Image: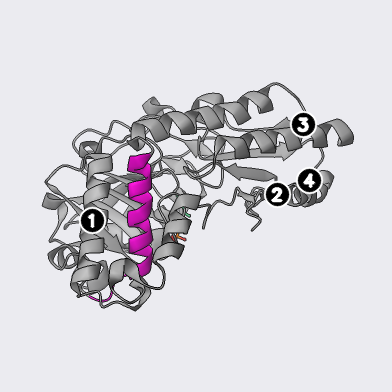
């Protein structure tokens, strides 16, 4: 076996302990005589797996009683549509804080169901910082305010939950979900595709305050109707059973690591290692203003883009995978999700130093 340090933005690295447990349980889950892949989602075994996963997630985040936890399909992109379909609630317009490519896409998709007002966007058109709070143009009548706590492509992150008054706050947490403690009660709704930090692709987690349910647009597909899904414990139809199960193992793993406070500190340390290195030399460059840098996705460019291919090839040979930046921004991106150990970050920095020393 030869596992690499996988810096991919998603699907992304998973804890080795979780993969080993999946392997151990693969053919015969807890004496059921079958794999989780082969079980009825209505049987007592899978119901127990599903309930345990929700219980562990609730414990990790301290999810209040008046919030429902849903395990849906369709990815974050599905939620870009489901959010307006469910949360416009008779209103015409919602506010979007656009601080990167995913937020822009979310606003575009929402525009098919209502008015997606851009309440904030960097004036220079570059997603390298979060526009100052005093420049935001929030509409107190908006159905909700949507933002992207961590912009996966540009490496820009909100380090505090934005203050938006009484309007429900909605967050696409995909690439920062479970990366540190979170006060769920500040949100109307949180959603996250699992494949960045919570598990394998195929399941999308939605945490929604109960009073926002029950007013979906009449043409909302049933599988995207939060109220219907909540009434059926996310099993209106066949759920993504295997992905749900693996997420449950990841939640247990995070609890075993000391919970979100411990995970958050570790993530902070990992990101600081890489940013400190980047700031102390001139061959590599990170364009994001320091205050708004992502702890999950660290982007950087090389002094000469003509060296990108050689950098990636050498990295692969050194057991460092998935470092190519998104095609829309170029350069490199190191995703440092929960399952990336500090030793992976240190190995990356050593490689970067050596590459700069020999190529600069
Ligand atoms: C990856 C990502 C998405 C897209 O997720 P899908 O599950 O592929 O639809 C959306 N938003 C953010 C912030 C992401 O990181």
Residue under pointer 4: 311
Q: CA distance from mark 1 to mark 4?
A: 43 Å
Camera sees residue 258: yes
**Quarter for ligand 1?**
bottom left
On screen, 222 above or below 105? below
Q: Main secondary structure of the magenta part?
A: helix
Q: CA distance from mark 4 to mark 3?
A: 11 Å
Are circles 1 and 2 on residues that touch, CB within 8 Å? no
Which secondary structure lies at badge 2? loop
Are circles 4 and 3 on residues that touch, CB within 8 Å? no
Q: Which badge, 4 or 3, comes first in the chain's sequence? A: 4
Q: Which badge, 3 or 2, comes first in the chain's sequence? A: 2
Q: Which badge, 4 or 2, comes first in the chain's sequence? A: 4
- Dot in front, 1 or 4: 1
Q: CA distance from mark 3 to mark 1?
A: 45 Å
Q: Report if residue 95 lies within the magenta region.
A: no
Q: How is the image coloured?
A: one colour
């Amino acid at each position: 076996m030869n596992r690499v340090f996988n810096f991919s933005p998603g699907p992304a690295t998973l804890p080795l302990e979780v993969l080993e447990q999946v392997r151990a349980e693969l053919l015969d889950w807890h004496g059921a005589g079958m794999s989780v892949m082969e079980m009825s989602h209505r049987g007592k075994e899978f119901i127990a797996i599903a309930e345990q996963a929700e219980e562990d997630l609730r414990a990790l985040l301290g999810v209040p009683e008046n919030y429902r936890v849903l395990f849906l399909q369709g990815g974050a992109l599905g939620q870009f549509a489901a959010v307006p379909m469910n949360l416009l609630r008779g209103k015409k317009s919602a506010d979007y804080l656009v601080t990167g490519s995913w937020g822009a896409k979310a606003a575009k998709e929402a525009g098919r169901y209502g008015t997606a007002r851009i309440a904030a966007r960097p004036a220079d058109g570059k997603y390298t910082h979060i526009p100052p709070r005093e420049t935001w143009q929030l509409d107190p009548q908006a159905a909700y305010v949507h933002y992207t706590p961590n912009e996966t492509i540009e490496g820009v992150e909100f380090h505090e939950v934005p203050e938006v008054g009484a309007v429900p706050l909605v967050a696409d947490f995909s690439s920062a979900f479970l990366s540190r403690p979170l006060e769920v009660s500040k949100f109307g709704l949180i959603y996250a595709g699992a494949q960045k930090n919570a598990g394998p692709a195929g399941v999308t987690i939605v945490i929604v305050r109960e009073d926002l349910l029950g007013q979906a647009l009449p043409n909302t597909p049933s599988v995207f109707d939060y109220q219907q899904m909540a009434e059926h414990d996310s099993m209106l139809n066949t759920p993504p059973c295997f992905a749900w199960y693996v997420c449950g193992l990841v939640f247990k793993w995070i609890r075993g690591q000391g919970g979100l406070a411990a995970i958050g500190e570790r993530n902070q340390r990992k990101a600081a290692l890489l940013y400190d290195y980047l700031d102390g030399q001139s061959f590599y460059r990170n364009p994001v203003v320091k205050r708004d840098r992502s702890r999950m996705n660290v982007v950087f460019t090389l002094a000469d883009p003509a060296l990108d291919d050689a950098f990636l090839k050498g990295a692969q040979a050194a057991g460092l995978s998935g470092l190519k930046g998104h095609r829309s921004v170029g350069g490199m991106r190191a995703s440092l999700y929960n399952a990336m150990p500090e030793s992976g970050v240190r190995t990356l920095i050593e490689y970067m130093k050596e590459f700069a020393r020999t190529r600069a």
